[in-house]
Image (cartoon, rainbow, N blue to C red):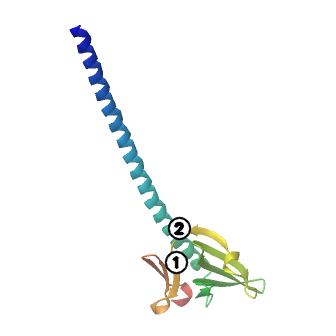
Amino acid sequence: MKTIKNRNIDTVFVLIVFGIFAFSVLMVLMLGAGVYRNINEISRSKQDEHTVASYVWTKIKNFDSKDSITVGSFGDSSALFIAEEIGNVQYQTIIYKYDGWLHELFSEKALEFSPQNGRRIVQIDEMEFSYADNGLIEITTGDKKLLILPRARN
């Protein structure tokens, strides 16, 4: 009878230890998933900021000629205007923030469009275009600032 009681106690003890081990493994997995989610979100945010900066910088450098790049407003936000001539027709590319997204709108310069007509590029929280000292174009995204000196202004 004593051996049966000892076996029952041993079995209960093993089950309790196994339960504690299983609970510990589950908690470590949950914590790891939370950390992974946070790191992934931070990485995506940084990648989006880098994508926006690279996109705007490339647009400016590819279409940089005398007086072709200006800063103004489009809709309710500041915008970057890039003018170009194709086959004796004036066109413009407008880069702006609308409805939580960076948008681009390419159109004939004489035509009027509204901000919702542009193509979504990447989701952003904040973006402002302005002129800084010495002909620099300042692009502000949240607490980050990018200064670009168009070649035509050097």
Q: Nearer the viewer, mark 2 or mark 1?
A: 1
Residue 95: % across, % down? 61, 78
Residue 17: % across, % down? 28, 28
Give whichever of discs 2 and 1 has the lower sequence position.
2
Q: Quadrant of the N terminus?
A: top left
Nearer to us in this view, 128 or 148: 128
- How crowded pointer 1 is (Cα within 10 Å; few <14, some 14-19, many 20+) is rated as many
Q: What residue do we see at 60% from left, 74% from top?
A: 99
Look at the picture and state if 51 lies above or below 130: above
Amino acid at the residue labelled 1: Met
Nearer to us in this view, 46 or 35: 35
Residue 125: % across, % down? 51, 72
Which of the 4 quarters of the picture holds residue 56? Answer: bottom right
Please identify the residue farthest to the top as the structure is shown: 1
Please identify the residue farthest to the front as the structure is shown: 1
User: Is residue 70 in sight in this rendering?
Assistant: no
Look at the picture and state if 42 lies above or below 137: above
Give the residue number, with chain letter if any, for mark 1.
127
Look at the picture and state if 61 lies above or below 44: below
Residue 41: % across, % down? 46, 59
Query: What SS does tag 2 mark?
Result: helix
Residue 51 tag number: 2
**In whole angstroms, how far apart are the C-alphas of marks 2 and 1?**
13 Å
- How crowded pointer 2 is (Cα within 10 Å; few <14, some 14-19, many 20+) is rated as some
Nearer to us in this view, 152 or 141: 141
